[in-house]
Amino acid sequence: MGENVYVVGIDMIRFGRFPEKTVPKLGAEAALLALKDAGVSIQDVEALYCGNLMQASAMVGQRILHEIGQTGIPVTNSANACATGATALRGAWMSIKAGVYDLVLVVGVEQLGKAGLLGGGGGGGGIPKEGLLGSGLMPAVFAEAGMEHSRKYGTTFEQFAKVSVKNHQHSTKNPKSMYRKETPLDMVMGAEMIAYPNTKLMCSVNVDGAAAAVLASEKKARQLGMKRAVKISASILTSDPYTERDLVMPDVNTCTRQAAAKAYEMAGIGPDDLDLVELHDCFATAEILHYENLGLCADGEAGKLIDEGQTAHGGRIPVNVSGGLLSKGHPLGATGVANVYEVATHLRGEAGDRQVAGAKVGLTHVIGLGSACGVHILEKTA
Amino acid sequence: MAAEAAAPSGPRPIVSYLKIPEGADPYLEGQKCTACGAIFLGERPTCSSCGKSGSFEAIHLADRGELYVYSIVYRSFPGIDVPYVSAIVDLEGGGTVKGNLIGIDPDPAKIRMGMPVQVVYEIAPRKDQEGNEYLTYYFKPRG
């Protein structure tokens, strides 16, 4: 199906809070880093796919080009909740796969600041529904998703909290992470309760951030040099299929399972072939669910996986060695490009102190509630 | 518009699927697909489960059900009293609804997933900008 597509340049800015900057300026920084990493200029780029959520109607991609070069190329702006960056990346991938372009730029960018609680809008007329008809706030929605796992398998508050301990520990070795502090178990469990069982340290961090990638066709990648090229061996996007409770309790499991199955099939591999995974730990509860959804363990074994440290750096299948959304930060539109940066950096053998030794294959996953799931599988080439 | 102006006084439903019939008890209404049996809250042109168009039957949802899952919300928007228990409830005979679970301590040691609950209807503690009252529903432990 079509020709192979490669990541030939990729980078991200360190996530943080930059109130003095604008969304286009943050995106431009990442774009220039990625172009430099690829050894190309904006003059070489044939199209731009840009992901941003909070300014979805404000032509962010074009405004990035106003900063780095108005070459007249087509720009596609995408918004797909927390799958926004992955959706932009997949658009770029498809355009090369279809043979339309040979060199395409992808930028994911978000300026969230201290956005506070997300979700809970309710909608419709009348009076606000939040706190009367339950909660639509993200910490509660993902808490309820976690409680479904507890109901089925007896997963405990402590097991959910261990996810956050692990990801914060991982982030101490990532210079591009927003936070780089260890948070022991008692600190995580004793932090302010936001929506049981998610404490404040079990909620992802609202930050500003940007990440960018340069994708190339096989022909173009060979011209540029394959030494650091990373193959995109699967790019999948799903939406939420009908399930019994989905319309009142968003089902983040089924769309992830379907995306993972399709991705493994497209890449011709299975979960046992993965050396590392960056998955959507928007809340600590979510990471537990996705161990099973992505096939990293059998159903019902996710609690055991975290207890045994199998997903910690050095374990059987390291998950979120970047620090994840819980510590690195979650700038919505940038997240689905930044996780590809993390995996690609390991496949290139350039991850420094946090390098997963001998990494050859990795998977990235995002979920945008409502819902959209994006999965990419990446493979080392040289 | 004239119909709206002439609407009888009394509380308005907080959501379209809460029905307040004259001279009868309020209830929650489901839209059941006659082809596949999927139950929805609120109307839609086509069943999103099986794809069959225009084939819904309005049904009274049960006022009894069981707590499927919950979360205890401690941090919410300004002006909203916390903590509150956000609950997902499976109703007897089908249909799943979300709402606040009341009449129980907001404590994971007390709340049991699977516990039987009753749907109760009360005037909401909020009014809209024109001062109109709304009828809402809650879940209470049963038995």
Image (cartoon, rainbow, N blue to C red):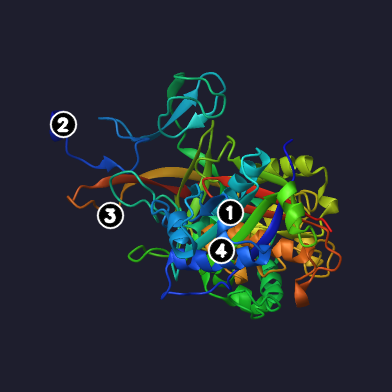
Q: Nearer the viewer, residue A362 or A8?
A: A8
Q: Which mark is residue B1?
A: 2
Q: Name above or below for residue A48 compared with residue B32.
A: below
Q: Nearer the viewer, residue B62 or A191?
A: A191
Q: Position of residue B9 (x, y in %)?
A: 17, 39
Looking at numbered disc 3 in the image, what kind of residue is underneath it? Arg
Q: Earlier in the sequence, mark 4 or mark 1?
A: 4
Q: Nearer the viewer, mark 3 or mark 2?
A: 2
Mark 4 belongs to chain: A
Q: Are marks 4 and 1 in contact (CB under 8 Å)?
A: no
Q: Which residue is mark 1?
A: A45
* Crowd around label 3: few <14 · some 14–19 · many ≥20 (10 Å): some
Q: Which residue is mark 3?
A: B126
Looking at numbered disc 4 in the image, what kind of residue is underneath it? Ala
Looking at numbered disc 2 in the image, what kind of residue is underneath it? Met
Which corner quadrant of the image does residue A131 belong to? bottom left
Cα distance between the residues tagged 2 and 4: 53 Å
Q: Position of residue A199 (x, y in %)?
A: 56, 69
* Residue visible at 54% across and 30% down in the picture: B93
Q: Name above or below for residue A258 compared with residue A148.
A: above
SS state under label 2? loop
Q: Name above or below for residue A124 compared with residue A156.
A: above
Q: Which residue is mark 4?
A: A31
Cα distance between the residues tagged 2 and 1: 56 Å
Which corner quadrant of the image does residue A10 belong to? bottom right
* Crowd around label 2: few <14 · some 14–19 · many ≥20 (10 Å): few
